[in-house]
C-alpha cells in the first residue's frame, strides 16, 4: 500500500511539475509581449491617433509593463523611479501574494494602453484572450488572481502619474493661428487641416531637463526674391529631387511615409487610408531587433520601454521647435513661387516644417537600439508589407534613421536642412536617454 501511495504521489508530483512549465512556456515567451505591443499598434492605427499622441500610449503602457518586471526581478532590472525624476516609487506586490510577473506585465501594459487616450474597452477582448491563454496553459488560480490584482495596482498607479504630464490641459489650449505671413506655416492640400497638436511641446518629458534642451540653429530666413538665397535654393532643391525620383527613391519615401491619416481625393470623392505612425514603425523595428537577439521576456520589455521613452521625448522636443519656428512647408513655397502645378510625392502632414519629426524620433530610437542591440546589427524591415510596401534592408539602426530622415526630402514634404538637423537633434536625445537611464542591470 505504501508503495502504491508513493507511486501515486510521484505521479501527482510529475503532473504538477509539468503544468507549471506549460504556462511558463506560453506566458513567459517574449514573442507574446511583441504580439501585445503590435496589438496596441494596430489599435492606434484603427483609431487614427496622430504620431505624438501615439507615442504617449506607447511610453506609459511600456513603463507599466517594465515596472512590473523590475519589481519581480530587481536583481536584473532597475526601477525607473528616481531615474525619471518625477516618477514616484511604484507599488510592490505584498509578500503573501503570488504573482507571475510576466503575466502581470502584459496585463498592466494592456490596461494602461487601453486607458491613456483610447476609447474605453479597446483592448478588452485581447485581455480576455490573454487571461484565457494563461488559464488554458495551467496557471494556478492563486497565481492568476495575484497577477491580475498586482497588474491592476501598477496600472492604476501609472495612470495616475500620467495625468500630471499636462496632456489634459493641452486638450483645451488655444488653437494655432493661421496668418498669411511670409515664411510661416499654413494648411496644405488636400485636407487643409488645422495645425496638429500645437501645444505638444508643453507635455512633460521623461528624461529631458526641459522641452527646449536640444534646439538647433534657426532655419534659413524667408527670401524668394533672391534666387541665390539659401531659402530659395532649398525649395528648388526639393522640387528637383521630387521631379526626378528613381524607383528606389520612391520606395524609400513610401516605406517611411507612416501617414496615420492620408486623404485620397479622386474627382469629387475622397477617402482615407491609414498606416501606423512613425513611432509605431519603430516599435515594429524594436520587435525585429529583440526577436533576432533572442532576448528573454524581461530584457525585451526593457528595450521596448527605453525606445518608447526616446520616441516620447523626441516628439516633445521636436514639437516645441516646430511651433517655435512655425516654418513653412516646401509645398507652400514651391506652388506659390516656382510651379503652381507641383505636388509632393507623399502627402504633406498638418504641422510646421522645422525640424523633421521623423528624423528626430528615428534617430532617437536608433541610438537606444544601437546601445541595446549593437551598431553592426543588419536587418530587413518587412513591417510595411501589410500596406503593400516591399521590405527594406539596413546595415544598422543608425543607417535606418538616416534613411527615414532623407525619405522626407524625397517625399517632398521637408527641406533637406530640417532632416539633417533633425537627425542630429534626435541622436542627442537618444544619447541622453542612454546616459541617464539604466534599465537592465549588467
Image (spheres, rainbow, N blue to C red):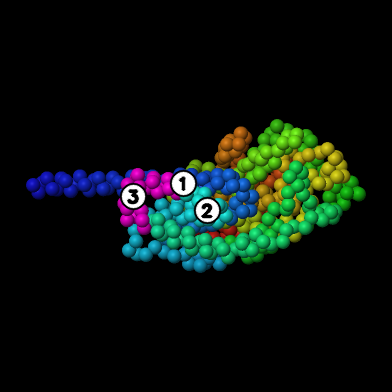
Distance, label 2 to label 3, CA atoms, is 28 Å
- Density class for disc 2 (Cα within 10 Å; few <14, some 14-19, many ≥20) is few
| Mark sitting on residue 125 | 1
Viewer-side label of 1, 3: 1
Residue 83 showing in the rendered view: no
Q: Name the residue under label 3.
A: 139
Among numbered discs 2 and 3, the one appearing first in the sequence: 2
Q: Could you tell me if the residues under marks 2 and 1 are in contact, i.e. CB atoms within 8 Å?
A: no
Horizontal side of 354 relative to 286 (left or right) equals right
Q: Position of residue 187 (x, y in %)?
A: 77, 49
Residue 43 showing in the rendered view: yes
The secondary structure type at the circle numbered 2 is loop
Q: Give the range drawn in magenta.
A: 127-146
Residue extending furthest toward the front: 268
| Mark sitting on residue 120 | 2
Distance, label 2 to label 1, CA atoms, is 12 Å
Amino acid at each position: 500500500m505504501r508503495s502504491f501511495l508513493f507511486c501515486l504521489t510521484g505521479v501527482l508530483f510529475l503532473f504538477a511539475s509539468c503544468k507549471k512549465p506549460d504556462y511558463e512556456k506560453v506566458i513567459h515567451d517574449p514573442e507574446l509581449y511583441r504580439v501585445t505591443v503590435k496589438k496596441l499598434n494596430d489599435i492606434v492605427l484603427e483609431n487614427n491617433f496622430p504620431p505624438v499622441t501615439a507615442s504617449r500610449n506607447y511610453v506609459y503602457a511600456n513603463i507599466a509593463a517594465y515596472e512590473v518586471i523590475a519589481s519581480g526581478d530587481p536583481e536584473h532590472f532597475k526601477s525607473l523611479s528616481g531615474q525619471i525624476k518625477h516618477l514616484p516609487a511604484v507599488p510592490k506586490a505584498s509578500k503573501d501574494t503570488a504573482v507571475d510577473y510576466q503575466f502581470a506585465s502584459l496585463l498592466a501594459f494592456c490596461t494602461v494602453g487601453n486607458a491613456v487616450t483610447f476609447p474605453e474597452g479597446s483592448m478588452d477582448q485581447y485581455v480576455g484572450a490573454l487571461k484565457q491563454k494563461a488559464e488554458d496553459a495551467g496557471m494556478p488560480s492563486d497565481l492568476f488572481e495575484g497577477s491580475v490584482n498586482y497588474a491592476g495596482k501598477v496600472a492604476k498607479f501609472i495612470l495616475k502619474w500620467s495625468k500630471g504630464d499636462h496632456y489634459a490641459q493641452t486638450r483645451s489650449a488655444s488653437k494655432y493661428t493661421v496668418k498669411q505671413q511670409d515664411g510661416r506655416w499654413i494648411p496644405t492640400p488636400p485636407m487643409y487641416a488645422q495645425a496638429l497638436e500645437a501645444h505638444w511641446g508643453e507635455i512633460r518629458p521623461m528624461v529631458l531637463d526641459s522641452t527646449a534642451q536640444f534646439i538647433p540653429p534657426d532655419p534659413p530666413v524667408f527670401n524668394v526674391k533672391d534666387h541665390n538665397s539659401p531659402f530659395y535654393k532649398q525649395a528648388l532643391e526639393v522640387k528637383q529631387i521630387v521631379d526626378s525620383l528613381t524607383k528606389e527613391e520612391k520606395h524609400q519615401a513610401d516605406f517611411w511615409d507612416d501617414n496615420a491619416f492620408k486623404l485620397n481625393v479622386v474627382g469629387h470623392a475622397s477617402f482615407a487610408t491609414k498606416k501606423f505612425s512613425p513611432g509605431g514603425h519603430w516599435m515594429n523595428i524594436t520587435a525585429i531587433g529583440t526577436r533576432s537577439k533572442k532576448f528573454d521576456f524581461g530584457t525585451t520589455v526593457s528595450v521596448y520601454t527605453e525606445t518608447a521613452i526616446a520616441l516620447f521625448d523626441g516628439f516633445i522636443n521636436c514639437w516645441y521647435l516646430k511651433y517655435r519656428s512655425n516654418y513653412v512647408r516646401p509645398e507652400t513655397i514651391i506652388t506659390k513661387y516656382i510651379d503652381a502645378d507641383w505636388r509632393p510625392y507623399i502627402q504633406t502632414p498638418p504641422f510646421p516644417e522645422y525640424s523633421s519629426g521623423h528624423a528626430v524620433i528615428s534617430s532617437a530610437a536608433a541610438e537606444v537600439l544601437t546601445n541595446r542591440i549593437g551598431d553592426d546589427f543588419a536587418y530587413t524591415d518587412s513591417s510595411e508589407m501589410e500596406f503593400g510596401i516591399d521590405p527594406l534592408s539596413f546595415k544598422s539602426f543608425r543607417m535606418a534613421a538616416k534613411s527615414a530622415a532623407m525619405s522626407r526630402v524625397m517625399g517632398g514634404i521637408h527641406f533637406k536642412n530640417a532632416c539633417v538637423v533633425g537627425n542630429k537633434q534626435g541622436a542627442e536625445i537618444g544619447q541622453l536617454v542612454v546616459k541617464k537611464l539604466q534599465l537592465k542591470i549588467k
